[in-house]
Image (tube, grey):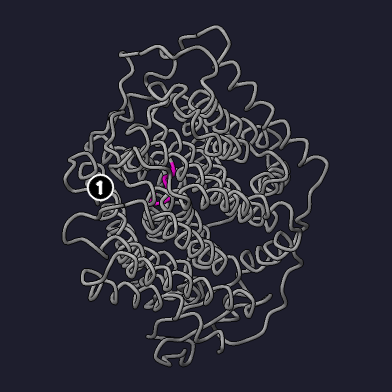
Amino acid sequence: MSTANLLPLGVAIPLLGAVVLVLVGRRLPRVVSDFLVTFWAAAEVADLMLLWMRTGDGHAVSWLGGWRLQHGESVGIVLVNDRIGIGLALLTAVLVLAVVAYSWRYFEEPPAGHAGTFPALILLFEAGMCGFALTGDLFNAFVFFELMGAVAYALTGFRIEDPRPLQGALAFGVINSLAAYCSLLGIGLLYARTGELGFAQIGQKLTGHRTDALLVTAFVLVLIGPLVKGAVAPFHFWLPDAHAVAPTPVCMLLSGAMVELGVYGAARIYWIVFSGPHGIPHHVFRDTFVVAGVITAVVGAVMCWQQRNLKRMLAFSTVSHVGLFLVGVALLTPEGTAGTALYVAGHAGAKAALFGVTGTLLDRYGSVDEHSLYGRGRELPFAGVLFVLGGLALAGLPPFGTALGKALAEHSAQSHAAWLPAVFVLASAATGAAVLRAGVRVFAGAGRRPRENHEVPETTGSGEEPEIRDPSRRVPLPMLAVPALLLCGSLALGLLPGIGRQLAQAAGLFTDRAGYVGAVYGYAHASAKPPAADWTAEGIALGLASAALAVVFAAAALWGAPRDAQSVVRPLRRLHSGHMGDYVSWLVVGIAVLLVAVRAQL
């Protein structure tokens, strides 16, 4: 089967699986429904794995319905991608398969009349994410983005009998829908100017126009959707609230795949649509989004350290790492892109594993509050080991894939600003330390017993409802085996040199605008030389330093003299109010700041 056929199958397989489960899922026994969703998820992994291997060092292009370019213009839908986009879709598919296996015994008794609904929604979610990663058309990127978002809202509020998931899903839906309207308006402006919707076609048509206010406005508006979905500050407020109330398997996908797609979308759209002659200059994009990435990393790390709700802690850790990912791609270098790709893959495995272990705590004890769980996890030693290893992976301990990706991104960042590697080290150390502190407290009962602090309320309560509702049973094997396998995958990314080298070569293609345009228009273009993607002494040293700092920070929190830092961080905590009006205001402020920042640098 040719790559032209494998590309549309990457969207069609999960869509078809969702239709089958909707039609027959309610009439089937639970075990048959689980088998069907596992079959469709595995088929998607197989399709994308084959596509990854066949694409090689080039691009895969598929014109749906045979509506190809005619005289440089098109009306058809095109799927086009390289190994970065295909690899992100493959990562999403692997995580979906892991979530499906994790969920075999997670929702022990689905709500009445909803048998088959959750797996069908998961497959629809996968179709939206993979479609967004594979498309070469701006409007269809918006369609897939909205499919992804609509299903994510439903999955976040899946437990409709509890008002808290509905509140989190509502905030998630409103903020992301407003961002989607902004993106659609930007797409309309570009279509009015160029008459095209394909990435490559718009980019080519824009070369004949000057960089004016319309182009700047379109650039900012189009990127708002991906930036909000990617939880880049100040668009990140919805994410911890949604994670705190979403079912644990959904959190594994939100943090492991969906937010990373936002960063990918922003980078892909800039490179192909706006980076050409008379577009948005490289230095404008680099300076603007490196600053945005640093702010996001710092805000996420500080808020992560302050959390006692484990799901909110992991959510803010995701925000911090998204900031680092944004810095990596904003450097606009193949090395930075290669490092980010490895970092994203390693982070996905580690973060999904941590959420998986948190799910065992929630359903064993009915809580994910670090303080109330003090020492109660001693009876789950294997889960404790997995949680601590996940914290070390987030901190960037070699040889995890997170450490190798961080090392490559740090090396590229150093050439832009000497202080940027310190941001990577401190942000990863702070987020890893928060996880280590919680893990040692919960699973070993180490350190002082935490004191209740009623002056610092959580946005969401700590008394969550168990999602299995049978805490007396033994922890099902998949709920520990899946996190273990995900951590092994994160470790393999750092140990297997071939993966890093392939992603480095793919990063050269990702940053090669002329090569992408040539693939769409049907002419050959010489590929750029790929960057190195191997361990270096400097990278290992920085990884060990961030891991050591994480251990020191965690030990200080557990055994050091208590310090009241609330007066310093209280203003930042108050910004995360949980009020939708505040979040909408920050959305407007963020749009205005981006418009001013981009325009001022031209």
Q: Is residue 469 left or right of residue 423?
A: left
Residue 459 rendering spot, x and y as whole percentages: 29, 29
Of 486 and 27, which appears nearest the observer?
Answer: 27
Count of picture labels: 1
Secondary structure at badge 1 equals helix
Report if residue 277 is visible in the image. no
Q: Crowdedness of circle 1 by 10 Å Cα count: few (<14), some, many (20+)? A: many
- Residue 33 in picture, x, y percent from top left: 32, 68
> What residue is rendered at 49% in x and 67% in y?
273
Q: For residue 423, what is the image quadrant? A: top right
Question: Taking 149 as reference, is 61 above or below it?
Answer: below
Pick the front one: 56 or 95:
95
Residue extending furthest toward the front: 473
Q: Residue at x 78, y 57 (%)?
A: 532
* Residue at the spot of label 1: 169
Q: Which amino acid does label 1 sit on?
A: Ala
User: Which residue: 59% across, 48% down?
Assistant: 487
Q: Split into 4 quadrants, where in the image is the N terminus? A: bottom right
- Residue extending farthest top: 561
Please tell me whether residue 82 is drawn above or below residue 557 in the rendered image: below
Q: Is residue 66 magenta-colored? A: no
Segment tinted magenta in the rendering: 228-232
Residue 349, position in %: x, y?
A: 55, 51
Left or right of residue 316: residue 87: right
Decide whether the magenta segment is chiefly helix, strand or loop: loop
382 is higher (above) or lower (below) than 412: above
